[in-house]
Image: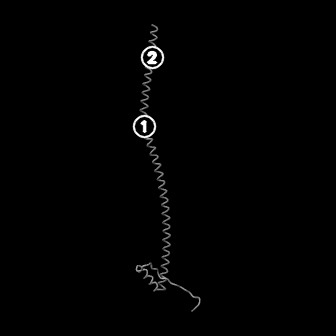
Amino acid sequence: KERLDELREEYKSKVAEAESRAGKILQLKNEVNAYNSELNELQPTVELKNRRDALTNECKNIAKQLYTLELSLSELTAEEQSRKSRQRSIEIQIQKLQDITNKKLEGLRRYEKDTFNGVQWLRQNKGWFKRRSFGTFSVDHKCSQSL
């Protein structure tokens, strides 16, 4: 009988141990399920992080492109200013030459009326010539000895 009591006690302890293990297993399963749920909730967060990283990289690339475009715009603006300056300089030179030509024509009109009329006629009728026509020219020659 003692032996039977010992076996019963041993059996009860093994059953209690098995129940304890089953309880621990159930508790661990619940923890695993909780972790799986938490992980499933974190999955979108990871996806959002990846999307955020992709958008950050895209923003960096756009910023680089914007910097490049701004640099190009700055260079083009500088070139345009330089071109405008050169164009203005050339326009001033052309105006000076026209002023000189007008002064010469005015002097010609005052002192050599016939030559002035000839120059005017050539300018008005230059389309009649096959080749380019030039204005009149004059030769001024001074002699040191009288004839």
Quadrant of the frame with the C terminus = bottom right
| Residue 73 vertical placement versus 145 (above, below) | above
Quadrant of the frame with the N terminus = top left
| Residue 67 vertical placement versus 36 (above, below) | below
Query: Tag 2's secondary structure?
Result: helix
Residue 25 is labelled as: none
Residue at the spot x=42%, y=37% of the render? Answer: 43
Q: Which residue is mark 2?
A: 14
Mark 2 vs 1, N-terminal side: 2
- Which picture quadrant has residue 36? top left
Tell which of 129 and 147 is nearer to you: 129
Tell which of 125 and 93 is nearer to you: 125
Q: Which residue is mark 1?
A: 43
Q: Position of residue 139 (x, y in %)?
A: 52, 84
Q: Residues within 10 Å of mark 2 (few under 14, many from 20)?
A: few
Q: Identity of the amino acid at label 2?
A: Lys
Query: Tag 1's secondary structure?
Result: helix
Q: Residues within 10 Å of mark 1 (few under 14, many from 20)?
A: few
Q: Position of residue 61 (x, y in %)?
A: 47, 49
Residue at the spot x=45%, y=42% of the render? Answer: 50
Q: Position of residue 131 (x, y in %)?
A: 44, 78
Residue at the spot x=44%, y=84% of the render? Answer: 118
Residue at the spot x=48%, y=86% of the render? Answer: 112
Badge 2 vs badge 1, beta-carbon distance below 8 Å: no
Q: Identity of the amino acid at label 1?
A: Gln
- Which picture quadrant has residue 8? top left
